[in-house]
Amino acid sequence: MVMMVATERLRPFSLSARVTCRSYSHHLQRVIVDFGADASFKDAQKKILEHYKLDLPLSSIQVIVENHAKKIFEFVEQEVFEEGSAKQIVVETDGSMIPVVDTAIPKEGRPDKRRCRSLRWQEARLCFARGAHLITPVFYATMGSVERTGDLLYRAALRIGFGPKTKVHGLGDGAKWIEDQMKRVFSHNVKYLVDFYHTSEYLAKAAEHSWSSQKDNWRKEQQNLLRESRHKEILKTLRDRLPINWVEKSERKPQKKPKNVEAKEQETPVEACYRYISNREDCLDYKDALERGLPIGSGEIESSHRYVIQKRLKIAGAWWKPTTVEHMLSLRTLRANGDWNRYWSNQQNAA
């Protein structure tokens, strides 16, 4: 690689020349990782050639970027934050799918990488925490378990000042794991709210199904009731359109059916809407959130997925090894958190 060649050429010279070589190597690696963090390795190669007149092998660029991504992962994992005294914070988390490739040695015949690659999609979970009246969040991401996501969410909260008296406003799209993890890591401090617009989607489908002649007016009326935390009135309206004894039957413990028995018919939109709202009654206090100037929609985390994760890890033609993608997520969140210079200063001091 260019950096190794430069080092060899400077060996006969003075100590100051060697220091200059290390500085050049540090700077060049920083440039390579800078380009590779935001664009494909091939595009990074073109940019380095265009701006620095260096024609580096594509494989070298990939190795340098992925090695530093691993170091960034380790750098982030070593950070420790103490509890703070923030009064109110907002936390959100959500997942999106990333292309991952598994490789294996063929059991029979000649080894052929083209035949032993299998592409799959795996969920990358992004989380953030920010002050209630601030716009700059702290991000973390993982391909790991929901428990790992909860731990990272807690770390993000600590970084912005979470403490024993901090009130936590949690938002999610209704997925049970999000609520469970927020309650696990924040306990009684968190008040979890289901995303208003996900709930509204169920209302819209129910309106289309059973209130088609006045669907728009009915949906808007129910949304206004949601904003006022009057969801019990919505349930009463929905119940009037449900089959007789449906509510009682749905609340019974489901019995395991034999394999030869066909699955029950799919729920109607009205039934699905009733079930969705009735199962989340303690997560629908939109009125309180609005009165305190807190968000009722999780669009912030959904849009963050696009520019923090998908902008690099989901570009056309990109695929990732399971051992690499977690490190690349750390690289992307490090940049989003504004920790880029801090990492490189640490690297230079350690050299």
Image: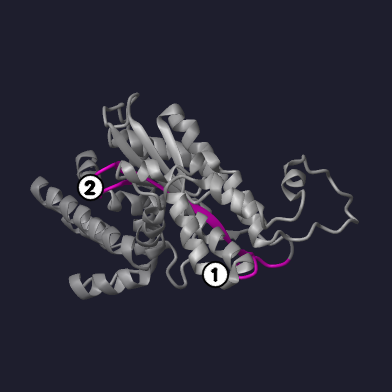
For the C terminus, give its image quadrant: top left
Left or right of 29 in this view: 271:
right
Region of the chain picked out in magenta, as a range? 109-138
Look at the image and tell me in which quarter the N terminus lies.
bottom left
Point 49% across, 53% down: residue: 95
Residue occupying the point 65% across, 69% down: 115
**Residue 215 percent location from the top left of the image:** 54, 68
Of badges 2 and 1, nearer the viewer stands 1
Any magenta on residue 115? yes
Q: Based on the picture, tell me whether residue 230 belongs to the magenta stretch.
A: no
The circle drawn on residue 214 is 1
Q: Is residue 228 left or right of residue 212?
A: left
Q: Is residue 137 above or below residue 159?
A: below
- Label 2 – label 1 distance at C-alpha: 60 Å
Query: Residue 55: which quarter of the image?
Result: bottom left
Image disc number at residue 69: none
Residue drawn 53% across and 37% down?
180
**Could you tell whether 141 is left or right of 131 in the image?**
right
Q: Amino acid at mark 2?
A: Trp
Where is residue 8? Give x, y as percent.
23, 56
Secondary element at tag 2: helix
Query: Based on the displayed image, in which of its 4 quarters is residue 303 positioned?
Result: bottom left
Q: Position of residue 137 (x, y in %)?
A: 29, 47
User: Do we see residue 37 in this rendering?
Assistant: yes
- Mark 1 neighbour density, 10 Å: few (under 14) some (14–19) many (20 or more): few
Q: Which residue does the numbered mark 2 point to in the structure image?
A: 344
Please give the name of the residue rendered at 13% of the width and 48% of the height, measured from the top-left corner: 19
Q: Quadrant location of residue 65?
A: bottom left
* Image vertical order of residue 89 relative to residue 300, above or below: above
